[in-house]
Amino acid sequence: MELSGLWRLQQFEVGQVRPLDVAAAWLDDRFWITAKVPGDVHSALIERELIENPYFGHNDAKSRWIEQKEWWYRHSFNYSLVHGTDEKEKHELTFEGLDTFATIYVNGKEIGTTSNMLMAHTFDVTRVIQDGKNSIAVKFDPLHLHNKDKELFQWSSYTKERPWLRKAAMNFGWDWGPRMVTVGIWGKVFIERYRRAKLDSVFARTRTIHDTGAEVQVDVDVTTLRKGVQKSCDIRLVDAAGQVVASAQGNVQSTESFTLQVVDPQLWWTHDLGKPYLYELEVVLYADGEQVDAYRKPLGIRTIELQLKDAEGQNAFAFVLNGVKLFAKGTNWIPADHFIGSIPDQRYRDLIDLSVTSNQNMLRVWAGGIYEKDVFYEECDKRGVLVWQDFAFANALFPDFNRDFMENVRNEVIYNIKRLRNYTSLALWCGNNEIDWLYDMKSAGGDINCPFYGEIIYHELIPDALELLDDSRAYWPSSPFGGNDANDPDVGDRHNWQVWHGSVYPRQFGDVPLLDYSIQGVTFKNYKKDFTLFSSEFGMHASANRYTLEKNIPNGQFYWNSVEMAYRNKDTNHQKGILLMEGYTGIPTNIEEYMNFSMLTQAEGLKYGIEHYRRNKHRTSGSLIWQLNDSWPGTSWSLIDYELLPKASFYYATKFYHPLLLSIDHEPGQDLHVWAVNDTLAELQGQVHVTVYNFSGEEVFKHTFEASVAANSAIQLGSLPEATVLNGASAEQVVVRVHTTDWAAPDNLHYLRDQKDLQFPATSLSVNVDAEAQTVQITANGAHARMVKLDLPQGNIRFSDNFFDLLAGEQVTVQISDPTGAKVDLNRLTVSAMNV
């Protein structure tokens, strides 16, 4: 029985009321406001217009008072005790998310307290629940009551108050979002009734896949509610057509292991390698012959390994799916909104759909948020997207010397391992974000001279728990991790923050960290120096889209360098973005140029880096861009802004993350090296054409390569001298197109000079809108069009392509759609280009 919908909400000053009075079953709460559950206090106050939207302007500062109050939720419901006081019946109340320090009352009786936002909490309410009307009250303390007397450590990024609190770190602010300390019931609430016995957990995983079948192991943990009960299980694996393909039966005591033999299984693949096929696993529990519990969840048959040595014994960091070494193409995921409890399930589906649309096959759930909601992993399972899962420890020291804290963490770790281990998409557990690496850098720099507090969590507690609870996938202690300096390109994974943050490399343990804030220090050209085994974080800022900014910036403040525009950027040194643009596009002079220049720099910079990583796929096995999404309407590293409007980099990603990639490796004055990358499992044969056009559309040069590209490989097709391809033309006035008609690789355009040096003539666009068909036909008249942009003042609109270039005379048709299925009003559509 889920207790969802509207609850009652009220605030008090700390100590203002006696808790048992407010928790009383008979309390008249009709004058309290209503609040949705799941949800949070901020969202309830916004919906009732009791606070202004914190995302608009500086309004977040106006809502800081919320974190100082005591907040109460109440709810009444009817419940039927069908079996009365039958001793074989048990009733459990579960909160899937309480943020954070809560005291829970049922019918006026205190049943327990919580101190962890990042896990569910279950209470036995058998002795207090009544037949008929019942009430629940939940009191939330302000955080300061629980950490005001705690030790402050030498390091905790953004605020020193959070290490003792098991709460989403990003609530306290990060370099892409504001401080927004939430409170409330953020997960589902439900009561479950059990008789005689219950399923405590089920763990299913693929043991082996061989020529004719697969072996699936299913572990069943059972809790007995009454002595002397005879328990048994029926286990069935059902295919998509509803047919049972494997089954097992047997008696079970507390823990029992069963093996399913599946003949000719359909395997689960990432969407770029095959079909993410899902069976359904059914486990039915019987006690004394009576069905008392059941488990039904999708299950994919697949093996996943983390390869740390290649066939030659050299260091590697590669994911191997069903025996196939894949190139991980993806992004880092942060919470989809600062108000985590109020995120609609559809927002998750939309973001994962966009990930698939842009050819991503992996998402990293970053440590500073939460262990994501079930809908996230369910969608990744369905859509064929692997998940790298961080444990929730980010950029701080943590009190691993404190027994109570460690017990809290242990419960959190065990709960989330059990909750997530059955998701087929889950590929890797990772202990923390950047802590091992930054502890060394901050120690070397003199910021820290204390022990590595927290080390026991990532190097003992978590791996010990995983050894007992999940033997089916790899564990990695930190990201980045490995080598001489945890960010060593030759061992483990790496975060490349030379680009954007100006970090100076190479570096070894103990070296004082250096930053180079110069055009050369932050430029994306530094990506080509990086021959990492796996790049798990890298990226650069870009503006949000016009609609997203205008919606959230006060009148008169939407201009370049305004105070409100600066407030959208929570990074430490805004000069970094200026330096990046100065080196590539030039410095913007107005808001339109800022949006265009920052988006183009991000898009071209990521293209530059990822094409380099993919050309070297014999060594580099993955790239996870920082970051996919935004949690508020700001300026950040995201590919998709808060209003679910993709930036230019997203549309570039559909091409640079395509399983088939044609690219050119070139620097000014040097040869053009033409490459083909094939991430599919089929060999490619055909011709690849390199054509050079001037900006008036005239062909300057053409060459054709005969190409044979083995499955899952990258090959250099050949080289062409720059002078040859220019054929007397100016490097500042041409574009190089590499394309094929023999397989489905997207065309790729390459410019021989940086954007600021290119000499584009003015052009014009012909635009033909078909409102009925929801299409726009665009033609470049007379000259090449640079970064054609379609804009609509509406959130979550999909364009089949956007932020693209058109050769002179080229025509393209763009499909426009609303994922809800509604018709899009095209009357407000604008179409522009940088040189129109």
Image (spheres, rainbow, N blue to C red):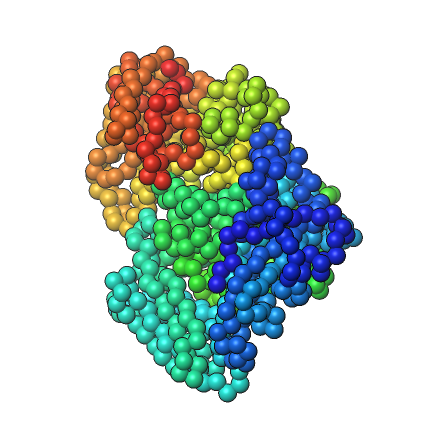
Residue that protrudes farthest toward the bottom in the picture = 228
Q: Nearer the viewer, residue 88 or 255?
A: 88
Is 442 positioned to the left or the right of 806 in the image? right
Is 163 positioned to the left or the right of 81 in the image? right
Task: Please say if 18 is above or below 781.
Answer: below
Task: Please say if 411 is above or below 436.
Answer: below
Rendered residue at 39%/37% (across/down): 653
Is residue 69 something one can see in this rendering?
Answer: yes
Residue that protrudes farthest toward the right in the picture = 149
**Image coords of residue 415 (percent x, y):** 55, 63
Is 480 positioned to the left or the right of 154 in the image? left
Quadrant of the rendered image containing residue 607: top left
Rendered residue at 34%/25% (across/down): 826
Rendered residue at 57%/31% (across/down): 56
Task: For the C terminus, give its image quadrant.
Answer: top left
**Image coords of residue 712 (percent x, y):** 32, 49
Rendered residue at 57%/69% (across/down): 130
**Image coords of residue 390 (percent x, y):** 53, 53
Say how many tags the image has. Answer: 0
**Image coords of residue 547 (percent x, y):** 46, 27
Is residue 463 something one can see in this rendering?
Answer: no
Task: Please say if 745 is above or below 392.
Answer: above
Task: Please say if 415 is above or below 375.
Answer: below
